[in-house]
Image: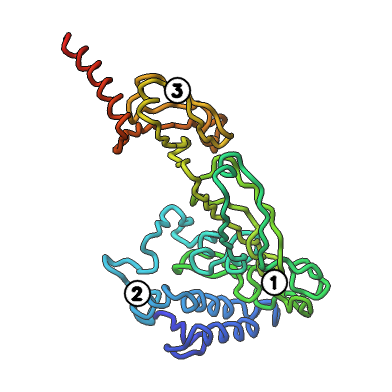
Amino acid sequence: MGKDYYKLLGVEKGASEAEIKKAFRKLAHEHHPDKNGGQNSEKFKEINEAYQVLGNKERRQQYDQFGTSFDGAQGPGGQNPFSQGFDFSGFQGSGGQGVDFDLGDIFSSFFTGGGPGGHSRSNRGSNIEVDIEIGLKEAVFGTSETISLRKEVLCEPCKGTGADKGTSYDTCDTCGGSGKIATTVLGTFRTQTICPDCGGQGKQIKNKCPNCDGRGANTDNVDIKIEVPAGIDDGQSIRLSNLGNAGKNGAASGDLYVVVHVKAENNLVRQGDDLISEYEVPFTMAALGGEINVKTIDGKVKLKIPAGTPSGKKFILRDKGVTHLRSRGRGDQVVIVDVNVPTKLNKKQRELLKELDKEFSTKKSWL
């Protein structure tokens, strides 16, 4: 006959998550093995087993779907629905007896949200995302920016512990100070999960820190210096580990993500690590040759226009582009020349062009 987990916890089938957790805590304190010389150990295991099922939304849905006879619930193909997706072959002891196998972080992450380091992952500080705007020159060569944030920071008086003077703790009654609770999974394997009462710390705050009210963190304004690497592109982000919001009760802080926006620069358009610019030259210069002043990210340079330059001609200025983000060197600047052909001419200009046209027409007749 299967176990009725609702009956074991003394709650109705429609009980809320909060009611189930409250019932478990009460019974766990009452039947903890440390009390009455360990006479309550079996009862404690049953209570914990029931909570591992009913306290998890997905497992509870499966349990409700397949009836209260959890041990005998069979899924398609005669499989226990709670064992589908896990291959436990090879972990059987001699005589087919169950193995005392500590699945550790695997099941704690599946069923409780617990993480490494003795803290529930839910205690980790949240990430922060901010936006900054820089100029193209700053993106090419890199820069430093200081931003001001209002965020959760570690409480200094309690050093993030949440306890008054950092030392006011009691051993957790639920797990006996171990930070974990042993339970039976799938009716065969025993595993350990993070204690829901202390979040895996094995201790509970006796007197809360008056500065943070037991949270281990406070909200404050913080100035953070950001090193923007040379070559960063518009829309790329910089990750600063552990500079997000502080975690609860000494848990790890979140990360800070800085999204960089690069302002547009007149007549300098980025394409990869190259910069593109366009310049108009009069058709006389295109025909006779000359020089133009070209704007680069390093300053102005003179560009020689050879005689007979056609419209659309591209000139390459080596190493005048963007710094390569993850290697040495820079891209190039590509200067595109557009020949400006006049649409309005005065009488003198027309006469000169007609003379020039006659010269070229005479040469063409020789061909």
Instruction: State which quadrant residue 118 falls in.
Output: bottom right
Q: Which mark is residue 2?
A: none
- Within 10 angstroms of label 1, few (less than 14), some, or many (20 or more) residues? some
Q: Secondary structure at mark 3?
A: strand
- Within 10 angstroms of label 3, few (less than 14), some, or many (20 or more) residues? some
Q: Is residue 244 above or below residue 196?
A: above
**Residue nearest the observer in this picture, 28 or 233:** 233
- Which residue shows up at 68% across the image and 62% down it? 148
Q: Which mark is residue 290?
A: 3
Mark 2 vs mark 3, foreground winner is 3
Residue type for callout 1: Thr
Q: Is residue 357 above or below residue 266?
A: above
Q: Secondary structure at mark 1?
A: strand
Residue type for callout 3: Gly
Mark 2 vs mark 1, foreground winner is 1
- Which residue shows up at 53% across the image and 31% down it? 320
Residue under circle 2?
A: 73
Q: Would residue 329 be found to the left or right of residue 198 on screen?
A: left
Q: Is residue 191 above or below residue 29?
A: above
